[in-house]
Image: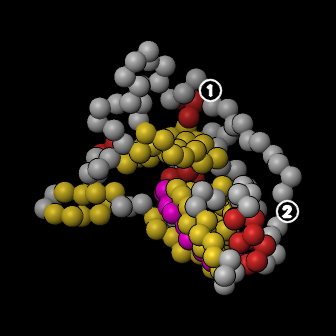
């Protein structure tokens, strides 16, 4: 991606592996978590098995793999919540919440917007913790042909507007020639 350009990516998460359009036995026997990222041209699919397999990541230009990809984003009236008290109140009132984090490097910026699935809220002290995922997490330092290769699934947690913590799914050695995706 050249400086001054922008690309939108849609992240779809999360589901289990299934036999799409089958009449019965919809879930696959050897099941895994499934999430994916699409842009106008590129895609990445992540399959997280109990133990890491070579099929964890599948990526490229989606037109070579799929007949069609449609983005169906629903816009809603929204407004920023300016204080911890507003966030706690909205959370306890079951208002759908979205989050946004901005990550920067010397030459790149990523703004990631996502639905908050889990919000811990405590109205006695007016404190909160957003804990959600997976979301796409960019690796700005990797030199890649396709920008979608920069992304990995990650989970995010934050309780203040100035920082967020992430757990990025990566292959981890757990024994001799055994890896897990964690």
Q: Are marks 1 and 2 in contact (CB under 8 Å)?
A: no
93 in relation to 89, above or below: above
Count neighbours of disc 1 (C-alpha within 10 A) and say few if under 14, some if 14 to 19, many if 20 or more: few
In this rendering, does residue 106 appear at all?
no
Q: Is residue 90 magenta?
A: no
Q: Is residue 66 left or right of residue 78?
A: left
Q: Is residue 160 magenta?
A: yes
Quadrant where the C terminus is found in the figure: bottom left
- Furthest toward the front, the residue is 124
31 in relation to 113, above or below: above
User: Could you tell me which secondary element the residue under label 2 belongs to?
Assistant: loop
- Furthest toward the top, the residue is 23
**How many numbered circles does the render carry?**
2
Query: Circle 1 sits on which residue?
Result: 68
Q: Is residue 94 left or right of residue 172?
A: right
- Residue 56's spot in the image, x, y percent? 37, 47
Display coloring: secondary structure
Q: Earlier in the sequence, mark 1 or mark 2?
A: 1
* Quadrant in the rendering for residue 165: bottom right
């Amino acid at each position: 991606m050249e400086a001054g350009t922008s690309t939108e990516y849609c992240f779809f998460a999360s589901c289990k592996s299934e036999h799409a359009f089958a009449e019965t036995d919809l879930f696959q026997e050897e099941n895994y978590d499934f999430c994916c990222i699409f842009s106008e041209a590129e895609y990445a699919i992540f399959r997280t098995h109990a133990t890491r397999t070579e099929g964890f990541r599948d990526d490229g230009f989606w037109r070579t793999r799929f007949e069609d990809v449609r983005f169906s984003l629903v816009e809603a009236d929204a407004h920023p919540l300016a204080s911890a008290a507003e966030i706690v109140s909205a959370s306890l009132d079951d208002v759908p919440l979205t989050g946004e984090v901005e990550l920067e490097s010397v030459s790149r910026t990523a703004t990631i917007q996502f639905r908050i699935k889990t919000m811990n809220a405590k109205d006695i002290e007016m404190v909160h913790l957003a804990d959600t995922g997976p979301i796409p997490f960019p690796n700005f330092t990797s030199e890649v042909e396709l920008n979608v290769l920069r992304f990995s699934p990650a989970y995010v947690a934050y309780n203040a507007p100035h920082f967020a913590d992430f757990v990025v799914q990566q292959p981890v050695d757990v024994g001799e020639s055994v890896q897990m995706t964690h």
